[in-house]
Image: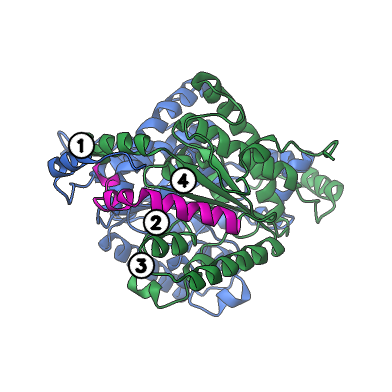
Chain colours: A green, B blue
């Protein structure tokens, strides 16, 4: 039975990872705009809503509320994790955003359990946290490289599900997004990075090595979607061949999530009338 | 002698704290636009330049460069520290921004030297750090509250100057901004917070207590400007009664600073032609 007056969850429903982890066409629009100019216009108005919701969440946190949002971005190289941060999180007040990018763990990080460095970057109350790659790399990469036994893999799925349950219990709503691109589009984006000197820094020869394992990565992602898409921390698959669609979709996922959270500006912990009266009596210092 | 071909430092020169710490009129434009519509238009184009410079700084950091920028925002309550973060830092990619707000130290923080919590929030290479209040609170507040002897004060000035020298040596350019508002404007802004429920959370009855020490705070700020405005970490005084002017001025201070730093997209650490050739031979995975 559909909720009658609840916030829309149209985009979340349409993009939620299928139980069998079948993936939509990376160039299609399972929901929302199918033309670029309409998508860009919709992102503009989405920006205003997102900023207003984020401000309320932030204010709620300042007022003692314990809730936060964590956006987890995963996807193959060039899938647009950085672009999403720039164009979607760039719509809201940087005061309320905590960004953390996770590269291959350093030797010092490897001496800790893999969730150690993740926990250190969790958003505090009122924040929207953004993980550009995440603890999911600790399943995907070693799996593709043949470094995890099936048992270890299962243990990690269970650990991650327990970790995300713990986050939910603590007030953090986890929104997991798989930016789904086609290998053809990746090839174009890699080329673009090699013909523009101002983009060289985004290119890494290791990207080709990862690309050569494309099918293995898709299989690893499919397993991740199957094993770790839970009701408290579902995965959304965003077709990401078109950047404007990706931006629109991630913005809407955040908006729907925040609308459901319905963050509240805190009640004053002081007497408003009394303070106003005091202000009236206040002079201007010499 | 003026530099012939160097980047402009017109705004930095005009707003740099005077040696005798005399302050400009908080409602005037010592440099730049004096009308709101022109100021807003200029902020738009400033946004593009700032974003481009910030991207280069970020890329430089990824490429192994060690430089970063730290924007320190100080000012009386309602002077617009948060608004500056939202409207100026909101112009750039959140990936490259590290925001830290410093409230009154907690009991746990008080058990450490006052610079301890500050150091933990310093930007890493490639980032623009933003301090919303800072180590300067550790001089201003105890001074006004009569908790620092003249000797202790002098020691803190010296410690802070040494700290900022250390930052400069380590590659961090510190840009210190005093958002200068009038007590009349503060009164209006405090009132606005009390008549709009969505702004209650920004109001704190303690703000009136601080306001009652307005003259003492202005004196404390004047001393801070005199004692800690150094060539490597100068103070800028931004007239902040008009929000659009404040935003424009802080954006320009950052742009001039970054233009002088002239961050460079890193040279590729791989053979571009060889990688392009490899890409040409790469097929599309099944």
| Residue bearing mark 1 | B280
Pointer 2 residue: B226
Residue at mark 1: chain: B
State the image coordinates of residue B267 (x, y, percent, origin top left): 18, 46
As drawn, is B256 to the left or to the right of A143?
left
Which chain letter goes with mark 2? B
Name the residue located 71 percent from the left edge and 38 percent from the top edge. A9
Mark nearer the viewer, 2 or 4: 4
Check the picture and name the quadrant holding the C terminus of chain B: top left
Seen in the picture, residue B276 relative to A233 is either above or below; the reply is above
The residue lying at 27 percent from left, 34 percent from top is: A192
**Residue interval drawn in magenta:** A200-228
Asked which secondary structure carries label 1, the reply is: helix
Q: Can residue A181 be seen?
A: yes
Q: CA distance from mark 3 to mark 2?
A: 17 Å
Both on one chain, marks 1 and 2? yes
Earlier residue among tags 3 and 2:
3
């Amino acid at each position: 039975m559909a909720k009658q007056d609840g916030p829309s969850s149209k985009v979340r429903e349409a993009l939620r990872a299928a139980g069998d982890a079948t993936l939509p066409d990376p160039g299609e629009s399972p929901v929302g705009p199918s033309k670029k100019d309409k998508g860009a216009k919709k992102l503009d108005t989405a920006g205003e809503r997102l900023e207003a919701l984020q401000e309320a969440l932030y204010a709620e946190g300042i007022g003692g509320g314990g809730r936060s949002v964590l956006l987890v971005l995963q996807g193959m190289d060039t899938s647009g994790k950085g672009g999403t941060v720039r164009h979607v999180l760039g719509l809201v007040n940087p005061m309320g955003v905590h960004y953390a990018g996770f590269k291959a763990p350093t030797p010092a990080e490897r001496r800790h359990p893999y969730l150690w460095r993740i926990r250190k970057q969790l958003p505090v109350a009122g924040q929207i946290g953004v993980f550009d790659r995440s603890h999911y790399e600790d399943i995907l990469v070693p799996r593709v490289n043949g470094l995890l036994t099936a048992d270890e893999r299962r243990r990690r799925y269970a650990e991650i599900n327990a970790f995300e349950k713990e986050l939910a219990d603590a007030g953090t709503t986890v929104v997991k997004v798989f930016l789904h691109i086609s290998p053809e589009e990746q090839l174009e984006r890699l080329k673009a990075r090699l013909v523009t000197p101002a983009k060289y820094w985004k290119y890494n020869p290791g990207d080709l090595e990862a690309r050569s394992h494309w099918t293995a990565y898709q299989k690893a992602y499919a397993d991740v979607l199957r094993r770790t898409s839970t009701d408290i921390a579902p995965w959304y698959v965003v077709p990401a061949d078109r950047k404007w669609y990706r931006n629109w979709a991630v913005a809407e996922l955040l908006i729907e999530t925040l609308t459901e959270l319905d963050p509240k500006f805190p009640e004053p912990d002081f007497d408003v009338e009394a303070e106003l009266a005091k202000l009236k009596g206040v002079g201007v210092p010499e």
